[in-house]
Amino acid sequence: MKRIPRALLVLTLALLMAFWTAVPAWAAEAKTEDLLDRTLRHYVEELKEDPSARGMVVGYEAVSLDRGESLASLRAEKTFVPGRVLQLLTGAAVLDGLPEGMRIPTEVYVDGQLSGGILKGDIILKGYGDPSLSADRLEDLAEALRKKGIRQVRGDLIVDDSFFDEVRLGTGWMWDDEPFPSSAQIGALSVEGNTVWVEVTPGRLGKSPHIQVSPAPDYLRVINRAKTVSGGGQALTIDRTRAKNELVITGTIGKDHPGMKVRRTVEDPARFAGTVFRELLRREGVKMHPGSRIVAGEKGPEAKRVGRVVSPELDRLLEHMVREEDSFYAEMLLKQLGANAAGEGSFEAGLEAVEDFARRIGMDAGFAQVDGSGLSRMNVIAPAHLVQLLAAMEKHPERERFDELLSASGTCKPLAGRIEEKPLRVICGEADGSAGMAGIVTGRGGDRIAFAVLANGVSDVSAARELLGRIGAALAAYPELPDPGDLPEEKVYPLSGLLDPLLEEESYRGAIAGVLVRSMDRGETLYARDSEALLTPASNTKLFTTAAALDGLGADYRFKTEVYRSGSLAGGVLAGDVIIKGFGDPTLATEDSLRVQEGPTVEAIARDLKKRGIRRILGDIVVDAGAFSGKVYGAGWAWDDESGYYQPQITALSINRGTVRFDYLPGEKPGDPIRLQLTPQTDYVEVINEAVTGPENSKNTLRLERDRGTNRIRITGSLPLNFSGDYTRVPVENPHLYAGQVLKERLEEEGIAFAPGSRVREGQKPAGAKRLATYKSPPLSEVVHYMNKASDNYYAEMILRTLGLEKTGKGTAEGGIEAVMKYAKRSGMDRHFNLKDGSGLTRYNRVSAEQIVKLLSSVAEQPIEEPFVESLPVAGVDGTLSSRMRDTAAAGNLRGKTGSLTRVSALSGYLRTRDGERIVYAILLNGHSEGSLKSLEDRIGTALAEYSRSEQEGEP
């Protein structure tokens, strides 16, 4: 072997030593630069080992304000549901848009002649949106009237809340949160946050407890169904009936319990304020005439102001908002911002002012804000947006006030006990399924760091708090952090090169994507991206409902409806009632355009009763919907969707999917009322048609809305003269009574008469009633076929409750979900997902792409495979996929269940690749996107159908 010359060897060793000594210096510099980023990413990686944190998806951004450098970033541009953290943006916009020192007034006026202590006219109480108005300050206004010499009022008490519009609740707020103070109604004249105190104390053993309501104890009707029992515990539910001033107290309270006191909201804020004020007037010795009323109205030009009270200064209101996490204050101030900026006290005007503010300070577009408090789950914003806000406020004229606002935040639970010096100014927030924090910290190295951390898919809030606490501590310690080591390499899948470019396009940068693609033939994962992330699945929820129902009830299961009579039948006269008892048949309908399947009809029932010789009914039509119990809406459904055909009420007896249909056309000429046809023809609903015909090519502004808690349907807006016509459906209130009313009307059409006092009423089938007939639906296989092809929410919810009734004995959503979870466990899935309904309407549902693929893979090996798979829409052929992926490799091939909510889209199912390989896939997309999420799904579906393994692997 030839020897290396000594001089060359020495030179080589010297160069190597120089290289070796240089590498650690370079590496140390690089490791210091990305130390915080690697530290925080390790924290997130460690979540994968924590079962309580499984499914949590996290995004953060940390930027040095002094150097303008990003120190740590993960999913920083992805948009999350922010919860209360959104109040950071609302608060900043209010500081920018409303004058410092502003105080919001409430005033009292008189309009009439005062003589001898008698006011021959009205008192007007006018509000301007003070969120802090209390009964004590209203008492000052009552005192002002007394001091004016008024002792008797012979007019009305007019409550004027016209400074704000009439929309009381925010977009997407959940109907079942309405009884609680965080969801109090918003009005320009509001007192005590539009809430009352409800105090419950034990009564005598076995008797009802004592209930005390204040203020205005008579404003709400109290239904006390609770009982006093032995012991010192309590299991009370204190609820307010939807759209009514009615409190319902149920459950038990122990004889030795000290009592409980809670706040509950009221309907109609101005009228509530007027009721409180009237009582205060009485205490001041000012008597209202017995005929005096509390009426909504506006202050007239002749009215004279007698008294005025004002709120604390604006900054104190904002401090209360963040310190107490007060959603009511946030929404009142948002409307105040709209009134100041645009002369319109509305959510829309306030949000436009916030959007304008965000644009002026340089925040990027690509977030969506629909309220001021973060209460709505339709809000989405990225960590990067919040950091931009924090950085911009450092240079804003109101910087000091903004700092005070951040400092006013109450205890941030994730940081409690972690940071003694409190170098953070931060706002934190938690809600079901989400957590977050945003603020400014000074690290130990002197860096001032703006940061935001948002987490969705939170199953265990303690895990989210732990993560946020660790991140906060790391930010405060930076750069004095131990080196966490290198990060694991990202896994590359066979389809990464095909699908990554689609999901990473600029137009989808705000969308969080949970995607999993697996070969059913090889059991191989072909692609995964955040596949364990718990996301909102929308109507992909129906996949779980379908599988569990087919397994638990059987493909041949038929829903039933029973008809009975009570009393004797002689000479064609029924001396009793006709009772119709429902068991959740979703196919029961009238014989018209609302019938979508060959199920039983109301007309057939009427004809059958006539055939049995009934010619006159002396009793009532009794509707028995007792097979289902619980609430008519699912948990977390939105209040402002109650007029939408897709969100009907759910009861065990219903017809026409709980809706009526309106076909509409323009009139003969502009200005004419539009032409309407109601189906079925029934007196059950009251129709108020105020819609008119507009000129040709004018904007279609038609709106059909049902007044909450009633069957009054208002039709407003206009149709262009050249509009070709359309239809929609509107849900009814109390669909079981609707079914009974239509049955009564159809019986009358058959010539069956009723006694003058006969009516339709709710009740239970009497024990001695005689069954006349049982009507059956088509088999479940056909029912789920329609449900999934049309993505019908009503069908899904009726099936879910029937499943609960049959398998758990509980005809409730909770009973149905219990059965779904048991099925999931039998099918090899864990319980690490969250379902609250059967249709996917609620945003409380949290499911991962991995769970959906497990479900679909399991179904493919079960006897229910055929009816399940056949129920799924086919791309380019039928159902909700009929117009999608046409003329592609996916057409006629891909089967999938679609899902859609605002800023949510999903598609999951089966397909075959170009080689015939069977694929199961799930795509869940949540968040704001400039591009169409449906289009992205279609492109992924087409790419999968075009995929050829043999071509990729170079096989001949």
Image (cartoon, rainbow, N blue to C red):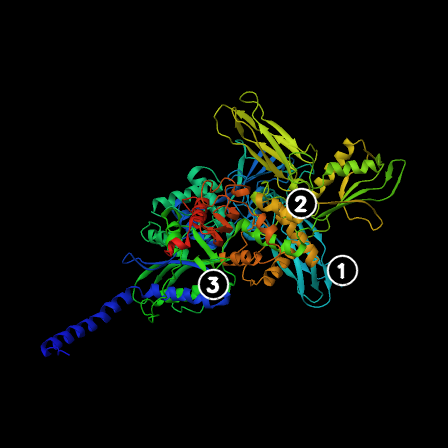
Asked whether 860 or 30 is in front, the reply is 860
What amino acid is found at the position of numbered circle 2 in the picture? Pro
Give me the residue at 50% from left, 63% from top. 461
- The residue singled out by tag 2 in the image is 586
| Residue 464 image label | 3
- Is residue 198 in sight in this rendering? no
Give SS at disc 1: loop
Which circle, 1 or 2, is nearer the viewer? 2
Point out the residue furthest to the right here.
Answer: 571
For marks 1 and 2, give the CA distance.
41 Å
What amino acid is found at the position of numbered circle 1 in the picture? Lys
Q: Position of residue 476 (x, y in %)?
A: 36, 66
Q: Report which quarter residue 819 is drawn in.
A: bottom right
What amino acid is found at the position of numbered circle 3 in the picture? Ala
Q: How many marks?
A: 3
For marks 1 and 3, give the CA distance.
44 Å
For marks 2 and 3, give the CA distance.
41 Å
